[in-house]
Amino acid sequence: MTVEEIVEKLKADERNQAYTKRGVPPVFQISSNAKILLIGQAPGRKVEETRIPFNDKSGEKLIRWMGIDRETFYSSKIAIMPMDFYYPGKGKSGDLPPRKFIAQTYHPQILRMMPDVEMTILIGKYAVDYYLKGKKKRNLTETVAAYKAYLPEYFPIVHPSPLNFRWQRKNPWFEEQVVPALQQRVHDILS
């Protein structure tokens, strides 16, 4: 299966018809040459408008956390496969959660297209819950703190959203210890 065939299947999927009718394509970045895979939540409104994954404040912070530049981030070495490929809309306290069927139906097909991925960065609760099912700690904070237990396959991190500033202020160890370890792993894989 090719990326184009996946895109056509997504557009034809009746569960995505509201997006297809509005001319909104699925938003992801897939490459058979990818060495690092990012699995985040879902595109936000700005990303849906620009059609570029992580093209927002969260993306700026994520790029910094990874210790790379935008050019590398948007290169064929980095793949971006969110838990939902479409903006799920606004809820009472932020964006709605990603729709479950996207990961269940489409992730396995896409993962087979990327045989050279050396590490998957799981960004936030939805990705961690799905991919570390049965292996995660009591909560996201404990899972991120125990990131070494999931290496070399997975590297769990919190979401880089500006709305996450309280968590980051309460957990300074993340920027002090986890971010440098993430940057080293990314550097080792890409060099």
Image: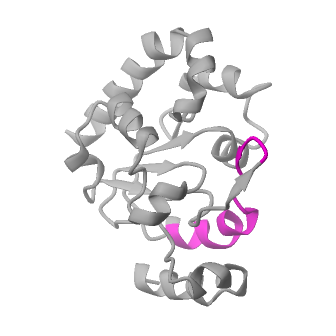
Residue 158 shows in this picture: no
Residue 39 percent across, percent down from the top left: 53, 50
Q: Which residue shows up at 53% across the image and 9% down it?
A: 172
Which colouring convention does the figure follow? one colour
Q: Position of residue 178 (x, y in %)?
A: 47, 19
Whether residue 85 is situated above or below residue 185 in the rendered picture = below
In the rendered image, the quadrant that contains the C terminus is top left
Q: Is residue 103 on the magenta stretch?
A: yes
Q: Would residue 135 appear left or right of 178 to someone viewing this image?
A: right
Is 155 within the magenta? no
* Along the line of sight, the residue nearer the viewer: 184 or 53: 53
Residue 139 position within the rendered picture, expressed as x and y whole percent measured from the top left: 76, 26
Indicate whether 29 appears above or below 171: below
Left or right for 14, reference 60: right
At x 70%, y 28%, the residue is 140
Residue at image position (56%, 42%) is 122
Is the residue 112 above or below the residue 175 in the image? below
How many numbered discs, if any?
0
Please provide the residue range marked out in magenta.
92-110
Q: Position of residue 28 (x, y in %)?
A: 45, 64
In this view, the residue in front, 107 or 73, is 73
Tell me if residue 130 can be seen.
Answer: yes
Q: Quadrant of residue 19?
A: bottom right
Q: Nearer the viewer, residue 77 or 92?
A: 92
102 in relation to 17, above or below: above
Q: Which of the 4 image quarters holds residue 177?
A: top left
